[in-house]
């Protein structure tokens, strides 16, 4: 995906643009499509887009943030890695300097190391929403567990008896796009889960 400006009916006010970091990935791609469906102009934040963005190259941040009202923050490989909270704090400061009004952060449920990154975003002085997520159901169909699924054997640490409320990425994208464009989730930490608990043994079956 590239920077996309969806056609807006003349009778509909055009919402201000949104930067979607990781916009070519599993979460960001879905969030971007939801926003485009709402006639929101989307800038995809990726190293290979016309306006390149790279988390570890601060020289790319200013152009990526220019003219954006809000930004979806998806850090890869993991928000809990050392140095990431400081990185998030610097990026949030750059967003504030660029005139961005709102940040929506993808975080992990139960990840103590990610809390510091959340705190850095919450302390930036902008509107914010934190989305803490459980395991994504699409880990088994689009991500690192697809290979084991195809081979017919899931090999993971643990005894397989711990239950998880696996979350569908399409449901996540609905909430993220609401947080980026609406007012009801501002200043909230939302812990997102799926509708029922499943053990890995049940998933395998």
Image (tube, helix red, strand yellow):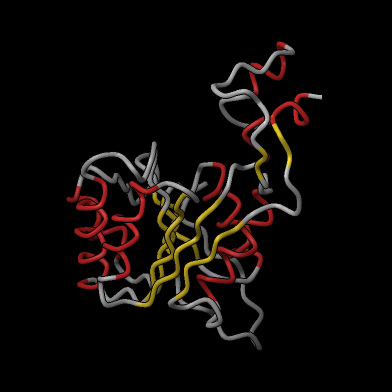
Residue farthest to the bottom? Answer: 11
* 123 to 157, vertically: above or below: below
Q: Residue at x 50, y 51 (%)?
A: 109
* 115 to 104, vertically: above or below: above
Q: Between residue 112 and residue 153, name the one nearer to us.
A: 112
Q: Between residue 3 and residue 106, name the one nearer to us.
A: 106
Residue 155 percent location from the top left of the image: 61, 16
Residue farthest to the right? Answer: 205
* 73 to 13, vertically: above or below: above
Residue farthest to the top? Answer: 151
Residue 56 percent location from the top left of the image: 23, 42
Residue 40 percent location from the top left of the image: 55, 70
Q: Residue at x 21, y 64 (%)?
A: 94
Total label count? Answer: 0
Left or right of 116? Residue 145 is right
Q: Residue at x 39, y 67 (%)?
A: 103
Q: Between residue 100 and residue 107, name the one nearer to us.
A: 107
State the image quarter where residue 202 is shown: top right
* Quadrant the C terminus occupies: top right
Residue 131 percent location from the top left of the image: 50, 60
Q: Between residue 87 and residue 42, name the one nearer to us.
A: 87
Left or right of 11? Residue 95 is left
């Amino acid at each position: 995906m590239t920077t996309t400006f969806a056609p807006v009916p003349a009778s509909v006010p055009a919402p201000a643009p949104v930067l979607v970091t990781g916009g070519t990935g599993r979460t960001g791609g879905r969030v971007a499509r939801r926003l485009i469906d709402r006639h929101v102009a989307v800038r995809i934040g990726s190293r290979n887009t016309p306006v390149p963005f790279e988390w570890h190259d601060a020289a790319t941040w200013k152009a990526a943030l220019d003219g954006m009202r809000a930004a979806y923050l998806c850090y890869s490989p993991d928000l809990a890695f050392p140095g990431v909270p400081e990185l998030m704090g610097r990026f949030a400061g750059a967003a504030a300097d660029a005139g961005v009004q709102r940040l929506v952060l993808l975080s992990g449920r139960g990840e103590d190391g990610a809390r510091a990154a959340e705190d850095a975003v919450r302390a930036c002085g902008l509107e914010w929403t934190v989305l803490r997520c459980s395991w994504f159901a699409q880990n088994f169909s689009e991500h690192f567990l697809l290979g084991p699924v195809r081979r017919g054997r899931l090999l993971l640490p643990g005894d397989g008896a711990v239950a998880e409320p696996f979350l569908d990425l399409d449901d996540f994208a609905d909430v993220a796009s609401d947080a980026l464009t609406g007012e009801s989730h501002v200043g909230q930490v939302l812990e997102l889960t799926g509708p029922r608990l499943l053990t890995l043994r049940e998933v395998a079956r």
